[in-house]
Image (cartoon, helix red, strand yellow):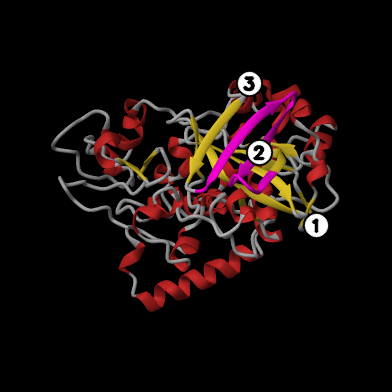
Amino acid sequence: MKYIGDKRNLSETVLLLFAAIGLWLCSSSPMRAQVLMQSNPPASHGQPVRAIPGVRYIGQSVCTQCHSGKVASQRATAMAKALESVADCEILRLHPRLTFRKGTYSYEIVRDGNGSIYKVSDGVKTVTEPILWCFGRGGAGQTYVFRHNGSYYQSRVSFYNDVRGIDLTFGAPNSDPGSIDDAAGAPMSHNETRSCFACHSTAAISDGQLQIERLVPGVNCEACHGPGEKHVAAMRTGNPQEKQIFNPKTLSTEDMSNYCGSCHRTWEEVASMHIYNINNLRFQPYRLTNSRCYDADDRRISCTTCHNPHEDPKREAVFYDAKCLACHNPDPKAAQVGKRTAAICKIGKQQCATCHMPKYEIPGSHFRFTDHQIRVVKADSPYPG
């Protein structure tokens, strides 16, 4: 499908039809599983990226032999730390005791050797479980997964960098839980567990099944490029024409949006789930597609135009100016060579994103997210949800 501009201009009937078709297509696609820790992902998700049955993952140490620079920079990214074992969790090592209280319940996370213990109590009953996995290592914070009553649970509290402590997990009910088990966290269904690990780690899924004992924590080379066994064999036999590896760089703008959206949520998925207003802010592919300037066939508006997946996103707004000027080009010759051009901003010539991609904080998130719906923002204008 090709979209230019705001998809919401479609009638509701057509919108829902497109959403249903999109989800049907996604259910059989080989893209990465979608997950956000506080969401309820559809059962169709949970497939690894371009994973070919019977082809082995080789690990970053092998990738480094030819791609040392990219591997080294990628290892330092937040994506590479999207999942950490409790033993390797830097946040919990640096904060050996974290406490929080909400209503009847008190919460405590205490470091114990190479592990951390999660404790919830109402003064009478207590739940005490070892933390197994730490999800998230970006600018916002980190949520914890443990086992309780035979199931994986997502902790009701999370660590937030902004407050340097723990608070309610984003999306957790603010009301007093009805039981000590509910106070501890939310049990994760089979599909939720599979999706969470699939998007936050590498090689977690085999034949559609979660295999935690085989996963590599974090998103590394083979999470996006697929297992590298055949690629390495082709390169070692001197057959560079048959690389036997998937390169997302070859995708069109629309396919790239859906590819990244398989973890960051696609436009079709957000629309079908009726996620409105500020709550859809953190779903970047959805927001970007709603931009008036979005063109499914123009690579200048794709995810990787601004974000190199081998590096953390640049925080300086001036970095993105050249990306904006690739379309908002004052040179009349640009139109003569068939490139789409747009008007030049009458207000400013630098740090375009500070005005046209404002930041908002979702209540309870302790973080200001950049809105990827590029637009002219007028004073006191409401959030276009």
Q: Which numbered disc covers residue 118?
A: 2
Secondary structure mostly seen in magenta is strand
Q: How many marks?
A: 3
Q: Quadrant of the C terminus?
A: bottom left
Mark closer to the chain start, 3 or 1: 3
In the displayed structure, 267 sits above or below 71; it is below
**Camera sees residue 246:** no
Give the distance between the C-alpha atoms of the residues marked 3 and 2, in whole angstroms.
38 Å
Nearer mark to the viewer, of 2 and 1: 2
Pointer 3 and pointer 1: residues touching (CB < 8 Å)? Answer: no
**Residue 253 horizontal side relative to residue 98, left or right:** left
Residue indicated by mark 1: 207
What percent of the width, then of the height, locates residue 117? Answer: 69, 35
Sequence-first disc among 2 and 1: 2
- Residue closer to the observer: 237 or 364: 364
**Measured from the top left, where is residue 255 in percent x and y?**
53, 54
Q: Position of residue 240 (x, y in %)?
A: 74, 35
Which quadrant would residue 3 be assigned to in this image? bottom left
At x 70% / y 54%, what residue is drawn? 194
- Residue 39: give its label: none
Tell me which residue sits at (21%, 46%) in the image: 377
Q: Which residues are magenta?
A: 104-127
In the image, residue 343 lies in the stretch drawn in magenta: no
Q: Nearer the viewer, residue 361 or 334?
A: 361
Which residue is located at x 46 percent, y 43 percent?
Answer: 303
Q: Quadrant of residue 46?
A: bottom right
- Identified by mark 2, the residue type is Tyr
- The residue that disc 3 covers is 69
Rendered view: 168 above or below 290? above
- Quick check: can you spot residue 365? yes
Answer few, some or many: residues within 10 Å of disc 3's Cα (few below 14, many 20 plus, some between 14 and 19): few
